[in-house]
Amino acid sequence: MGTKKIEVEEQEFLACCGSTRFAQEMVEVSPFSSLDDAIVAARHVWFNKVDVNGWLEAFSAHPQIGQTPFSSSSSSSSSSAHSTSAQWSKGEQSTALSTATTSSLQQLSEWNARYYQKFGFVFIICASGRTTEEILAELKKRFPNRPIVEFEVAAQEQMKITELRLAKLFSSKAKEFSTG
Amino acid sequence: MGTKKIEVEEQEFLACCGSTRFAQEMVEVSPFSSLDDAIVAARHVWFNKVDVNGWLEAFSAHPQIGQTPFSSSSSSSSSSAHSTSAQWSKGEQSTALSTATTSSLQQLSEWNARYYQKFGFVFIICASGRTTEEILAELKKRFPNRPIVEFEVAAQEQMKITELRLAKLFSSKAKEFSTG
């Protein structure tokens, strides 16, 4: 089992990070011996191979923070990558959703709109374990950034999200091995 | 005459830099007392107000370097901003075009294609006074850059082009004043 390589499909990588180029390049350098190997490869692909259009494509695959993925996915066609991504997104926002009040959600919604108006993409944050208040504070802190600076900050947050999702993916693959 | 403000229209700003947001924001802070004032404002707008989509929009308004703007404009609808931009682009590439050989143009075309494939936008360079060989050397030097790094380099080159074009625009406005 130690030398067994882990096979991952393009759609599965796409659920981790919504850039088509990312998913294709990851398949290209697959399979991986471990999660660590996959994360090293993913970082290289994301920061060196995926172009700025690919970054924007990945950002646009996220629901607006504070919105449940269900409502944002209603207009787009359903795919396995999309539904997995939506499910993970819900899990990542569970702390935020459980700590949200009507007032804080309202504020978050208003600041999200201002953010989108300024930067042209949704606010990307690795939300795992963060409360709505913390997310809102982070949004306000990042808002004065120059667009190019914020673009790179968002890409770093996207990478954190991708790493957590790769971990979930590999963990579920390991279960398949042991039970299958 | 010293206190006379210089009126510039949105279409004229758009010919200097093909981002709609850039042109709109420049009109917003117009009129200007001098070219220097306009350049200071343009730098602020370009680096702080125009988002990454606006940068990509401005880049896409340029012909591929080494191609005459005439051939690249054939498919898009003609506008005053577009035709002024195309004319200026031709002038900016005059040194390159006069020093070009069939072989160097062929090489430039191949490297442009590789560049576009990697970065997802055309190679942007302030070409004024540069030979084809110099432009090709610069393209090869910038090619290994990470996409986000190259994106910012391209934006700085775009700003240099915009400054030269603002100078031409203000110079022609000054002539209108003195002859009109």
Image (cartoon, coloured by chain):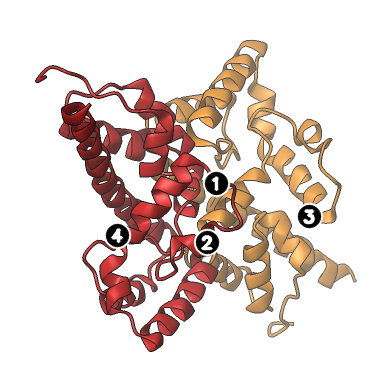
Chain colours: A red, B orange
Q: Which residue is mark 2?
A: A72
Assign a secondary structure to mark 1.
loop
Single out the mark in the foreground, 3 or 4: 4
Mark toward the start of the polypeptide (1 vs 2) = 2
**Do the numbered discs 1 and 2 sit on residues whose CB atoms are within 8 Å?**
no
Residue A154: % across, % down? 36, 57
On the same chain, marks 2 and 4? The answer is yes
Single out the mark in the foreground, 3 or 1: 1
Q: Which residue is mark 4?
A: A92
Residue B121: % across, % down? 56, 38
Q: Which residue is mark 3?
A: B81
- Distance (Cα) linking label 3 and label 1: 41 Å
Hey, which quadrant is residue A25 in on the image?
top left
Residue A46: % across, % down? 35, 39
The quadrant of the picture occupied by the C terminus of chain A is top left
Assign a secondary structure to mark 3.
helix
Single out the mark in the foreground, 4 or 1: 1
Q: Which residue is mark 1?
A: A78
Read off the chain for label 1: A
- Distance (Cα) linking label 3 and label 2: 38 Å
